[in-house]
Amino acid sequence: MDWLNASVQGVLLGGQYALLACGLSLIFGVMRIVNLAHGVLAVLAAYLSLVLVQQGLPLWLAVVVVVPVFAALGYAVQRGLFNPALAQVGAADGARGAGELAPLLVSFGVAVALTNLLQEVFSADTRKIPTGDLASAGLPVGGLSVGVLPLITLAVAVAVIAAVQLVLARTTTGRAMRAVADDAEAAAMSGVDPRHLYAVATALAFATLALAGVFVGMSTQFSPGYGDLVLLFAFEAVIIGGLGSLWGTLAGGMVLGLAQTIGAQIDPQSGVLAGHLVFLAVLVVRPGGLMPRSVQA
């Protein structure tokens, strides 16, 4: 029963990792950029939600406010920081290529600055978004107690990934994003503006990471420096699943979560280490990940 419980908890934990990794996978799939500020931005979303809740807003309403705010922030960051960084290296049309390093460095600078800003404003003390009885609520399933909050997180992760995949596959904007991801120059020649579509993709990614940040803040203690760990777990989930593959990201999150909980079942001190070892093993055996398929496919 202990092993079954560890497996169930690993799947639930994997849902949180998949939700965290969705935006990271989307940005890489469209622009081939690893956003190093991803983790601290998720933490920023958690802090913003916490402030809104402390001001008297219900948690659900705080989420409704935070997600569109981050979507707008993502659009502004892409147009104001990442696209100009590409232009500085001769990619003024927003096309990918030799300029991929520039926005990577910009995202690193944003991460460092934002982490220090959060520490100045909120201090290094840990916080948690209050959830009332939801934090300890559980459902009895076959002799196991399944947490309601992790179950909701898993359901939201699946729904978000399905919705983003649907947008990419069935909408005009999504098809344009896939065209730009495949060949930005050819798409620009057909009248598509890569810079705008990159910004739309980043807005969508920021919306998903904001939602993930709220769930992280609800489920665990966080501080300004917690973004580094969030980025690490999200990155590992993306790599395990396959770069740019949204459903692969879900699978990668599950594998990482299972590795950590089963590893902790073997040795309580080695759960996180077990996840890192699985990540390393996937890199060695299948460098492209378990489901190596990009968003343009």
Image: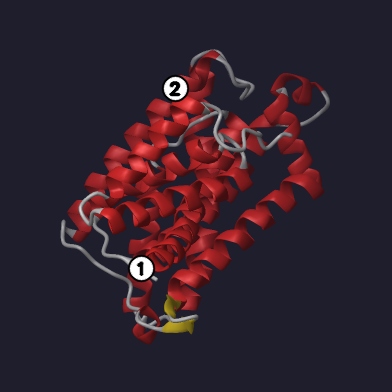
Q: Which residue is mark 1?
A: 2
Q: Nearer the viewer, mark 1 or mark 2?
A: 1
Q: Earlier in the sequence, mark 1 or mark 2?
A: 1
Three-letter code for the amino acid on which mark 1 is drawn: Asp
In the image, is residue 34 above or below residue 86?
below
27 left or right, relative to 295: left
In this picture, is 271 found above or below 281?
A: below
Q: Give how far across and how far down residue 212 sits, in percent.
A: 46, 59
Is the image coloured rainbow, by chain, by secondary structure, or in one colour?
secondary structure
- x, y percent for residue 167: 73, 51
Q: Is residue 164 visible?
A: yes
Near-viewer residue (102 or 135): 135
Residue in the picture at 28% in, 69% down? 128
Residue at the far front: name it: 1
Per the image, the residue denoted by label 2 is 102
Q: Secondary structure at mark 1?
A: helix
Question: Does 121 sit left or right of 249 as displayed?
Answer: left
Circle 2: residue type: Ala
Residue that sits furthest to the left in the current view: 124
Let me know if residue 171 appears in the view.
Answer: no
Quadrant including the C terminus: top right
